Image: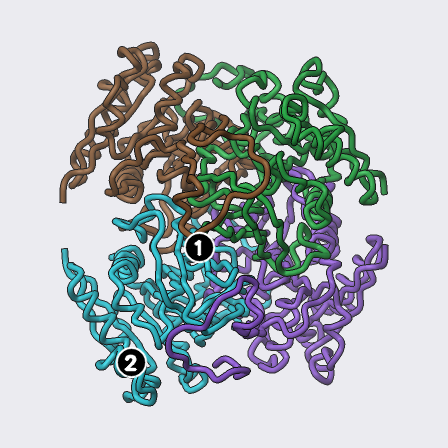
Chain colours: A brown, B green, C purple, D cyan
Amino acid sequence: MRQIRVTVWGENVHEQTNATVREIYPSGMHQCIADALNAAGGITASTATLDQPHHGLPPGRLDDTDVLIWWGHAAHGKVRDDIVEQVTDAVWSGMGAIFLHSAHFSKPFKRLMGTPCNLTWREAGERERLWLTSRNHPIAAGLPDHFELENEEMYGEPFGIPEPQDTVFISWFQGGEVFRSGATWKRGAGNVFYFRPGHETYPTYHDANVQRVIANAVRWAHNPAARISRPSDAPNVPVESALEPITERGPKLHAAGEEGYR
Amino acid sequence: MRQIRVTVWGENVHEQTNATVREIYPSGMHQCIADALNAAGGITASTATLDQPHHGLPPGRLDDTDVLIWWGHAAHGKVRDDIVEQVTDAVWSGMGAIFLHSAHFSKPFKRLMGTPCNLTWREAGERERLWLTSRNHPIAAGLPDHFELENEEMYGEPFGIPEPQDTVFISWFQGGEVFRSGATWKRGAGNVFYFRPGHETYPTYHDANVQRVIANAVRWAHNPAARISRPSDAPNVPVESALEPITERGPKLHAAGEEGYR
Amino acid sequence: MRQIRVTVWGENVHEQTNATVREIYPSGMHQCIADALNAAGGITASTATLDQPHHGLPPGRLDDTDVLIWWGHAAHGKVRDDIVEQVTDAVWSGMGAIFLHSAHFSKPFKRLMGTPCNLTWREAGERERLWLTSRNHPIAAGLPDHFELENEEMYGEPFGIPEPQDTVFISWFQGGEVFRSGATWKRGAGNVFYFRPGHETYPTYHDANVQRVIANAVRWAHNPAARISRPSDAPNVPVESALEPITERGPKLHAAGEEGYR
Amino acid sequence: MRQIRVTVWGENVHEQTNATVREIYPSGMHQCIADALNAAGGITASTATLDQPHHGLPPGRLDDTDVLIWWGHAAHGKVRDDIVEQVTDAVWSGMGAIFLHSAHFSKPFKRLMGTPCNLTWREAGERERLWLTSRNHPIAAGLPDHFELENEEMYGEPFGIPEPQDTVFISWFQGGEVFRSGATWKRGAGNVFYFRPGHETYPTYHDANVQRVIANAVRWAHNPAARISRPSDAPNVPVESALEPITERGPKLHAAGEEGYR
């Protein structure tokens, strides 16, 4: 089987500006995640960052990406709208997408969800415990029924997402909150997964369980089917090519061969 | 119980430019729909159109709208983005929304779904038969298990929507296609319904069954709870007000009282 | 509008055999719940118990019940299978059903879910905090974003249920677990809600928030449509009455007018 | 990768008693399906039938089955309840299950769905056209957006199933009906797929598209994770082993180490 090609997109801001973050992730969070994926087996991961031309996603890059991973936080507003549109188009055409932590407020995640994607939060380094809610789900392969992160940012419900197709993890927080930490949706032909952990001041992406969830999610999100070209097309079916013989009746708005309105 | 306040939004283009449409809907499709709702009991419906200032949705109008109905076709691209944002915000805050027919490609519907919302189509005046797929669903109250429209435009699968929370109707078309014609979702605090029939060159909105579906959908979509103000807020919960006593640990990114990134 | 008719079914075992339970619920848990509903407005609630003839559900009783509430624990195995079948049939025909706490393991709930409905548990009188996960959901009307029960039994994930249509509440427990405490499904024509709190040694059903959730759930689950008679029927549509004219072709198994296999 | 082990269960009644069926499926429908799967690649399929001891599913057989396929029609009532329970237990523990055509009324399918699973039907050899509704879904791999079966039994909506997690196919029938022909659910740890075509008097299981759907569904339903033993267990978590330190408070019903009620 050929390798799954992953692009890990990171905004790469706090790694440059914050000493704590730089110390934990000297090559960037995106590189830490890509390294773990490259070690997981069956996956070839590379990175892309905000500061690169086209935010690291030049024409053709998404076509060659089976699964895109997205981490952003301080610079959501700097992501160009045309790039966001390329990402959502690629998802609709069949690319898998995994949104991590603060990417809940990234432009592409909000566009794919159609909801506010908001939550409550607290940065206090408290304990988080993730509970599995969908037994034997491929995204939880090899994981126990629960695992802990000793220091994490809290995200609390209500989380402004659409009801998931699968709720895979729910988190318990020391300070008293809960959160749907792992959830799946399908958007067009693309599989989408949101995974909560990963505040940049903690070594979360060095955690073995977190790395395993992300590698599992890549395998789950990857769809080997050929990508759909022009996934938003709305083709006209002329009356002559109707699958059952019919005769045109009544008044018409569109001339023969005309495109539909958009 | 107080009346449900409905705003029927119509782009009102073909009613002005196409003789067939004007003849069927001399006061506009929006007015025909509003008239039917005003006769249904418990509902007060008014209209708004694209050509009015703020597309008929000036500040405050959506606050006073319990359920918004949207019909658009030729002029999707002319709807201002700031108005679209006001509509999605209102839905997230709890306003119900019903999208009719070609509004599958309207900006607010696409934004709320997060998917391409595309389909195949044919304008041949063929027979459509809608089958109920969720027995006793409130949107189907008083309707038989199926009903017909003798002349309609065909919309065919695959329909580029997220898996619905309830699939209420599926259509059979004479030319050989099928379509999920009635489907529900929740977006933020708002209930959303899509209903397929309603091509402008046919008298669909004069049909008693269609009128009944729309009135039922208004009652289903209406949520009497107080609207949520600022439905996208992501409030910080300071460590001092944590529900369980915790002590701050580890490095921090945010100063006390700072807003989160967006 | 006519009153919603509720039957609160309680197994009424520990109220008879355990002094603590009897002290908290001198007239039984079922009566406490019914009293709260009768005070809520628009609802007429009565009770039924295991020890009565037909477990208090003689022929006709379920026909006159808009919403059935079920609490059982020690005596799940003593519930007669024919009564279970009458309950599931009534749900399929349009009766609402609310299952409380340990009713997760009741026969009718397991039959309606099709899953093991299992969980982890601990009886330690610990704190439970319920978080709202679906803003403005009718079942949460008038409730804050979270509320607490100072002493409750713990139920923990993984909870063996099908993915809900709406996840309404998720619980945080003091001992470190989380649980999907409020969830909805549709089964046949009937609306089903599961609500977690209610261990019999604590005064949970005297709690105002809990009472409000149950009253809200009754209103949500109630479907005013006429009950479907024989909700499992699979009618044959003879070729002569096909909605589109077709001619019979090929070999047949069934003689004209014959019933299908079951 | 090791082969996926499939057991194709067939009731094998009409193959013995009806000349038409015997002619189309001289070795039985189950064998025809197993042969196609054995030719599909990566799958090892064997068969089991009603008339064999334990209906062909003796102790251990389901443990060694990754995906069970079930076809039944005339003899649903003859399937032993203890075997049904073994099947649902195996699904809950992680075995995949595919139910074909008239198995909508089989005992294990009804038990897993929790709904009536009823429909309307007509045996007239009419044309069925299956439309894909979830683009790039693994169960539709390599299939066009629609395909036809020239002679099939009609099944019509409303189909008494729970709202699916994925609706994969919807059928159009010549006589005017529609039907959700391919749908998925998760039950416990097991993936479940229902696929409509396959009336025994037509050569449906010889059709290349139908065979491809079934092989795809096997790959989709198969979960390589270790099977969960005792999937209905509800373990007690003693207060001493709580993940967060808590102190027992309040009255108790259960003695230490006691099993919960069922």
In the drawing, does residue A120 fall left or right of residue A21?
right
Please report the residue visible at 58 percent of the width from the left and 53 percent of the height from the top.
B130
Judging depth in this view, the residue of A39 and B149 nearest the camera is B149
Q: Label 1 amino acid? A: Ile
Which is more foreground, mark 1 or mark 2? 1
Please report the residue visible at 48 percent of the width from the left and 49 percent of the height from the top.
A246
- Please give the label number shown on residue D57: 2
Q: Do marks 1 and 2 share a chain? A: yes
Q: Label 2 amino acid? A: Leu
Please, what secondary structure does the residue beneath circle 1 have? strand
Q: Which sits earlier in the primary sequence, circle 1 or circle 2?
A: 2
- Residue C177 on image: x %, y %: 48, 49
Label 1: how many residues lie within 10 Å, few (<14), some (14-19) or many (20+)? Answer: many
Q: Mark 2 lies on which chain?
A: D
Residue B91's quadrant in the figure?
A: top right
Judging depth in this view, the residue of D244 and A34 nearest the camera is A34
- Residue A101 on image: x %, y %: 40, 30
Real-space Cα separation, disc 1 to disc 2, in angstroms: 32 Å
Judging depth in this view, the residue of C26 and C12 nearest the camera is C12
In the drawing, does residue A191 fall left or right of residue B49?
left
- Residue A1 on image: x %, y %: 14, 45
Question: Residue beneath label 1, please?
Answer: D170
Q: In this view, does D220 lie above or below C81?
A: above
Label 2: how many residues lie within 10 Å, few (<14), some (14-19) or many (20+)? Answer: many
Please report the residue visible at 64 percent of the width from the left and 74 percent of the height from the top.
C230
